[in-house]
Structure formats: structure tokens, C-alpha cells
Image (cartoon, grey):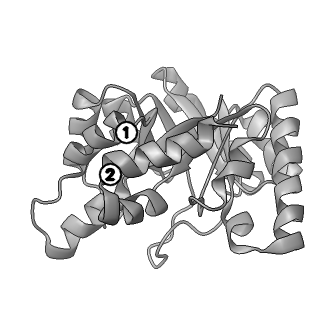
Amino acid sequence: MTTLGVNIDHIANVRQARKTVEPDPVQFAFLAELGGADSITVHLREDRRHIQDRDIFLLKETIKTKLNLEMAATKEMLEISKKLLPDYVTLVPEKREEVTTEGGLDVKSNVNYLKNFVGYLKDSNIQVSAFIDPLNEQINYSKEIGFDFIELHTGKYAELKGYDQYKELQRIIESTHEANSMGLIVNAGHGLNYNNVEKIASIDNMNELNIGHSIVARALAVGLEKSVREMKSLITQN
């Protein structure tokens, strides 16, 4: 059964808008878990625009589920992750000017560097995922590099409509099956919401969906615990 990872970066976005102490994403992670979250996802960015170092270390100490740390493949982040020891790390591309992550990590163009980077993480018993576009060549290189997981970027699927969205869904399904055949565990995320999540959740052997913005936006109306519970229901009814 597909599980739900809740990304709480947007809670931190509200806090950092005023550079104050509230809302505290660590407290809201507790509500997400009450709503049924199977893991908590945070992206520690180079510029610390939302999640802070303090947040990730408190989350590691307090959450009852799993901690997924999204980060760029940099020396600074490697050192932090080896101190933190999250349940797993998801390597993502990162640009300072972007509002949110734009597209998947190009593992094909960084094979040797990423092999070493992933190896250093595994030396600390951290499982590692690559956030990639649903392309066979990226999947093949993810396997060669030594990733345990891949997370398929669903942003294009979320943006398209009608038959174009159907074609993108088929590409994600095929990518999931291809990765599974290689022994890779498959997660997915980006742009998923209450209207488009069910078809992704119903893909055979889809492990976990990471969802943030839609859940936090819904929480403004109904509260975070309920918004997580509603999303979890959509995912698990398939």
C-alpha cells in the first residue's frame, strides 16, 4: 500500500516571512503524524529560506515516524546529514532563484561525483534517494550510482490536462515498473493534490508519495491533522 510523506517546508515559509518563532514546523509535524503521515519531509536549502538547521535536529529527536531530508549534493549538506542521521536523504537539484524545485536531478551528468557522495552517506547507514524525472536513462544511472530509492518528479503530470496528462501518467507507470525491475524502491512527488493524487497512488509498487503545498494549503481551512487525514484516505483507498 502506498504511504504518505508530508513535506512541512511551507509551515517554515510562513515563519520565515516574519523571521519569528511561529508557526513552528516541529510542532506541526506532530499534527501531521496524528493525521496519518508515514514520514516527514523537509528540504534544508543552502540559503535557509524556510527550514533551519535547528528544525531538522529537533525533528529527528521528536517525530515518531521517519525523517526524509531533501538536500543538494554539497559538502556542507553531507556534513550536516552525517551528524543528523535521518532515515533517508533525497538528493535534489537546487537553484537559489527558484521558488520550488524545478525538474529532477540529472544523475546521468554527475555519475562519478554522485557515486562518491552516495557512498559517503551509506557509510553512515543512511539510505539515499534521487529525485529524478521519469526517464529510463536517469533510472539506469540511478541504479549504477547506488541509490536505494528514486523519487519520480510528477510536476509535469500535475500541470497537464486530458490526454497529455494521461500520456505522462503512462510514462510514470512505465518508469515505476522499470525501476522496480532493477530493485529500486519508487517514491513520487511534486504538484500532487487532492484532485490528481489517486491515479499516482494506484500505480503498482508505488512506495510513498511526498506532498506538501496542497496539504498545507488545505490546512488553512480545516487544520493540518484533518488535511493530512483526507489526503491519506485518497492514497490508501486504492
* Image x and y of residue 73, in percent: 52, 50
Left/right of residue 171 with respect to residue 159 in the rendered view: right
What's under tag 2, amino acid-wise?
Leu
Residue beneath disc 1: 35
167 or 59: nearer the viewer: 167
Q: Is residue 166 above or below residue 63?
A: below
Q: Is residue 28 above or below residue 206?
A: below
Left/right of residue 39 with respect to residue 59 in the rendered view: right
Left/right of residue 40 with respect to residue 51 in the rendered view: right
Q: CA distance from mark 2 to mark 1?
A: 8 Å
Residue beneath disc 2: 224
Which mark, by number, is residue 68?
none
Q: Is residue 135 above or below residue 146?
A: below
Residue located at (82% from left, 57% from top): 169
* Image x and y of residue 155, in percent: 66, 65
Q: Is residue 55 above or below residue 101?
A: above
* Image x and y of residue 8, in percent: 36, 52
85 or 157: nearer the viewer: 157
Q: Quadrant of residue 234?
A: top right
Label 2 Cα crowd, 10 Å radius (few <14 / some 14-19 / many 20+): many
Q: Quadrant of residue 101?
A: bottom right
Residue located at (78% from left, 74% from top): 161
What's under tag 1, amino acid-wise?
Gly
Which of the image's four quarters has the N terminus?
A: top right
